[in-house]
Image (spheres, rainbow, N blue to C red):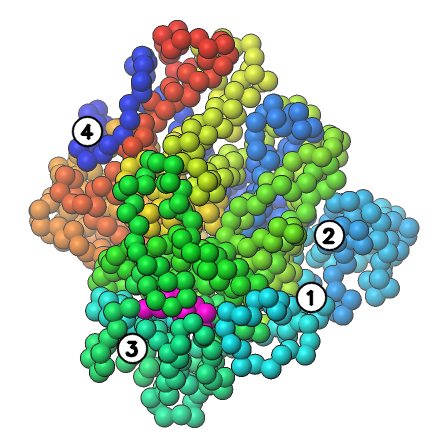
């Protein structure tokens, strides 16, 4: 179903503000300019009914497409994507093309249910076979020589002796006879079970002064892997309790730990999602730190131990601190039901957030694991105390603007590095009513590999559902702890930089992550050190050493073999815009603490222009300078570049520093798919759905979503209903001229004015439209794994329309140009370069040149 283009577009709301193109430009039909929708829809249609084989040589599905990958020796693009699947053979060719050489690595990405699980390879005490020179892991691209006695590394060409326990004879094709029984020799992505030599080391002595340890010194250099331990750290200050944030967090914890019983047969209960075998501890904090003895032997009311010294934090108990939640269900339930309830004792107005984090870290010392922190107050006491809130209005647009994106006290960075070194990931739920300095406290999550969830002006009725689902996703997704990650490349290439949420010791190439989960990705840049043979392949290998949730020490290895190209046309033909856009976004965010936003925006435009100019010069040099020629792989690059400048961390309009830093944290660690859907949100028309849309198919049970629309008011009707989703929230926009029957079918009210704009979920009605729309929303929830906030925006009436308008990135908003104006601006820059600085009036766009 194709969305209909209206004859008379809706004018932009007066609250949208943007910049106009300066200079003359011809009138161009907005429908004629390149759009990502055509490519997205065509790619989905192509891979809807056929699997994708991972052997090199073909085009790769877009990150926004649901597809089934068959591992043929290369990792699925869900695990590794590169900016071009034909690597330039020389650094000169790479510079001419101006395509950054980047790989996006998401080692624990969720699989499609129809795909084979990742094989687990256990080679016993000898461990996985590794190159004696570069320490790369054996993989399908390696070759066995000397009758199988040695194997040749595809990364460095070194020949390593095969261990006697791993030896097998070769056939006439120089292939091992047990090739098909060895997943590591025919699968691009595998898990290796590893022996004691790979166990996580104890933290360096230099990291001990933060807290007083009650544990005896370790007798070994490494610690035995165990099921993950969780510490839930709750803010019980006055503001957290009065806002309902603490009570909502306790309710979500109870549901996650023990599930919800069913109301009746029609409403089944919700099962618990806490991993079996894992242990849990609960800490609360205000002006003191409170620990709880949760052992089942105590009374139903747990014993509380208070640590008042915020500067010299220690753990006052060990037995009973961590427990199996099923064995201590009554104790934990009584504790969580009592927390967050006003009354009983006076509530403090301050909370020692930094000291609470140290207490959580001290509890996990020698274990590793995950801290889930709930905070709602600006930390004014204890470790890392911040005295005053900065006046942001005087800093934006000045050279001091960059100070808003860095911790104000280096103590927070030190704490973050210690968490990463201890193998502890810190995830934060922030439910504050005033600024909390995300730039300072958020670095603990960023460097430890944790997550962050942002609920300003927390309202249990509005935010409770999202908080519940976010916590369930946090606990139930694939997660490893005590992680060390390294990406290796073959001869002629070298790794130059990394972007993501991790801690990197600059003395090594390893990335340390307290936790790494299914939703996180790391970007890796590489460059040439020598000429590559275009008759051969270039190789990348990512290895993550981690402890699984159930306590197994493993290495997740992802391998990629890439073709080498000596022609610019082939480099562009197999380029991957999704990876390039993600790299541009992360690179721009990494510069926020070092330079002004305006300069970063200029550099983004320069990079976009350089890539298109590289294609223009080396693949389409014969075309006249006035004609804008865009390669097929980068048809929407100007639009996505503009969308990057309209994201909350980088846009020019007034945005609070907390909001900018929160979104910077999220975007720096997002998967490729989530990033692309955040930059160009999915917009769907709901008022003209055909009866076949969004209803389960009898054979497969899958639903077909409506076609996407371009993100602009130009393509909307005043009588329409539209749903937009940017991976962070969903907004349902209702036109002022919408049919009363549509409103009745979807909301069960008779009039546009009677729609409850504060509703959090659509009512369950027996109408076809209600079923279809709820199926679409449920499908999007299942794809992302959690339930975001749903906002209702009636045209020219509700405040949520501001969020809706800001997501329409093709329009003139967010203190930036419209897509049409920006495309003309980019074309002007390219034309000036080709003509040696021709004046603007000579740039003619008489027809759609693309």
Closest to the camera, between mark 1 and mark 4, is 1
Local packing at callout 4 (Cα closer than 10 Å; few below 14, some 14-19, many 20+) is few
Which mark, by number, is residue 843?
A: none
- According to the image, label 4 marks what residue? 11
Closest to the camera, between mark 3 and mark 2, is 3
- According to the image, label 2 marks what residue? 136
Local packing at callout 2 (Cα closer than 10 Å; few below 14, some 14-19, many 20+) is many
Identify the element where label 3 is drawn.
loop
> Is tag 3's residue or tag 2's residue first in the polypeptide sequence?
2
Q: Is residue 551 above or below residue 656?
A: below
> Is tag 2's residue or tag 4's residue first in the polypeptide sequence?
4
Local packing at callout 3 (Cα closer than 10 Å; few below 14, some 14-19, many 20+) is some
> Is tag 1's residue or tag 4's residue first in the polypeptide sequence?
4
Identify the element where label 2 is drawn.
loop
- According to the image, label 1 marks what residue? 198
Find the distance from the CA under tag 4 to the CA under tag 3.
50 Å
Magenta range: 351-360
Identify the residue shown where x is 43% and y is 93%: 297
Identify the element where label 4 is drawn.
loop
> Is tag 1's residue or tag 2's residue first in the polypeptide sequence?
2
Which mark, by number, is residue 339?
A: 3
Identify the element where label 1 is drawn.
helix
Identify the residue shown where x is 42% and y is 85%: 293
Residue 305 falls inside the magenta stretch: no
The answer to which of 347 and 589 lies nearer the viewer is: 347
User: Quick check: 234 left or right of 133?
Assistant: left
Q: Is residue 2 in view from this perspective? A: no
Find the distance from the CA under tag 2 to the CA under tag 4.
58 Å
Q: Is residue 695 above or below residue 463?
A: above
Closest to the camera, between mark 4 and mark 3, is 3
Contact (Cβ within 8 Å) of mark 1 with mark 3: no
């Amino acid at each position: 179903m194709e969305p209909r283009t209206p004859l008379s577009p809706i004018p932009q709301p007066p609250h949208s503000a943007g910049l106009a193109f300066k200079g003359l430009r011809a009138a161009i039909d907005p429908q004629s300019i390149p759009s990502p929708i055509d490519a997205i829809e065509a790619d989905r249609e192509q891979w809807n009914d056929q699997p994708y084989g991972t052997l090199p040589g073909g085009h790769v599905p877009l990150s926004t497409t649901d597809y089934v990958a068959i591992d043929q020796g290369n990792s699925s693009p869900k695990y590794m994507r590169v900016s071009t699947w034909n690597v330039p053979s020389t650094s000169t060719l790479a510079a001419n093309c101006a395509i950054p050489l980047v790989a996006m690595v998401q080692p624990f990405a969720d699989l499609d249910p129809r795909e084979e699980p990742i094989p687990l390879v256990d080679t016993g005490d000898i461990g996985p076979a590794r190159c004696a020179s570069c320490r790369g892991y054996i993989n399908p691209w390696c070759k066995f020589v000397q009758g199988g006695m040695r194997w040749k590394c595809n990364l460095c060409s070194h020949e390593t002796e095969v261990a006697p326990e791993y030896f097998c004879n070769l056939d006439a094709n120089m292939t091992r006879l047990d090739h098909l029984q060895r997943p590591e020799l025919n699968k691009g992505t595998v898990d290796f079970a590893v022996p004691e030599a790979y166990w996580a080391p104890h933290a360096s002595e230099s990291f001990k002064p933060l807290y007083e340890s009650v544990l005896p010194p370790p007798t070994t250099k490494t610690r035995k892997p165990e099921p993950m331990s969780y510490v839930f750290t709750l803010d019980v200050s006055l503001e957290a309790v009065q806002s309902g944030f603490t009570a909502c967090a306790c309710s979500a914890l109870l549901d996650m730990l023990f599930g919800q019983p069913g109301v009746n047969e029609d409403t089944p209960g919700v099962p618990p999602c806490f991993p079996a075998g894992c242990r849990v501890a609960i800490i609360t904090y205000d002006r003191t730190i409170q620990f709880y003895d949760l052992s089942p032997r105590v009374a139903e009311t747990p014993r509380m131990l208070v640590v008042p010294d915020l500067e010299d934090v220690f753990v006052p108990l060990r037995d009973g601190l961590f427990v199996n939640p099923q064995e201590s269900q009554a104790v934990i339930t009584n504790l969580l039901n009592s927390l967050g309830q006003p009354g009983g004792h006076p509530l403090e107005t301050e909370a020692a957030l930094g000291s609470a984090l140290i207490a959580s870290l001290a509890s996990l010392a020698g274990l590793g694991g995950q801290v889930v922190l709930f905070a709602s107050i600006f930390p004014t006491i204890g470790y890392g105390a911040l005295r005053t809130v900065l006046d942001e209005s005087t800093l934006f647009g000045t050279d001091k603007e960059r100070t808003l994106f860095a911790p104000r006290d280096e103590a927070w960075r030190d704490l973050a590095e210690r968490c990463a070194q201890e193998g502890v990931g810190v995830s934060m739920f922030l439910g504050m009513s005033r600024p909390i300095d995300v730039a300072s406290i958020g670095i603990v999550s960023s460097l430890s590999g944790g997550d962050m969830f942002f609920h300003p002006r927390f309202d249990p009725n509005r935010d409770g559902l999202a908080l519940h689902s976010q916590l369930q996703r946090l606990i139930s997704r694939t997660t490893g702890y005590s992680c060390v990650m390294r990406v290796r490349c073959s001869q002629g290439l070298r790794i130059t930089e990394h972007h993501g949420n991790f801690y990197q010791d600059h003395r090594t190439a390893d990335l340390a992550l307290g936790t790494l989960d299914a939703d996180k990705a790391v970007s890796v840049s590489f460059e040439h050190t020598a000429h590559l043979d275009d008759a051969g392949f270039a190789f990348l290998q990512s290895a993550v050493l981690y402890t699984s949730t159930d306590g197994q020490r493993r290495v997740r290895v992802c391998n990629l073999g890439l073709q080498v190209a000596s022609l610019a046309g082939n480099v562009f033909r197999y380029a991957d815009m999704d990876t390039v856009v993600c790299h541009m976004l992360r690179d721009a965010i990494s510069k926020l603490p070092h330079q002004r936003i305006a300069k970063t925006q200029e550099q983004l435009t320069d990079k976009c222009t350089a890539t298109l100019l590289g294609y223009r010069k080396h693949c389409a040099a014969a075309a006249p300078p006035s004609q804008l020629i865009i390669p097929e792989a980068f048809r929407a690059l100007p639009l996505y570049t503009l969308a990057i400048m309209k994201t909350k961390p980088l846009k020019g309009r007034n945005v609070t520093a907390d909001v900018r830093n929160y979104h910077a944290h999220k975007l720096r660690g997002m998967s490729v798919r989530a990033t692309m859907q955040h930059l160009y949100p999915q917009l769907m028309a709901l008022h003209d759905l055909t009866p076949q849309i969004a209803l389960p198919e009898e054979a497969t049970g899958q639903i077909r979503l409506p076609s996407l629309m371009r993100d602009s008011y130009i393509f909307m009707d005043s009588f329409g209903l539209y749903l937009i989703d940017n991976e962070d929230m969903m907004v349902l926009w209702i036109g002022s001229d919408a049919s009363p029957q549509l409103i009745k079918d979807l909301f069960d009210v008779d009039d546009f004015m009677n729609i409850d704009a504060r509703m959090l979920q659509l009512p369950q009605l027996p109408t076809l439209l209600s079923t279809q729309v709820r199926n679409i929303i449920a499908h999007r929830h299942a794809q992302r794994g959690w339930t975001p906030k749903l906002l209702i925006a009636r045209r020219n009436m509700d405040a949520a329309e501001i969020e809706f308008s800001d997501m329409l990135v093709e329009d003139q908003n967010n203190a930036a140009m419209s897509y049409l104006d920006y495309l003309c601006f980019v074309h002007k820059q390219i034309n000036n370069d080709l003509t040696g600085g021709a004046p603007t009036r000579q740039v003619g766009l008489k027809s759609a040149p693309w």
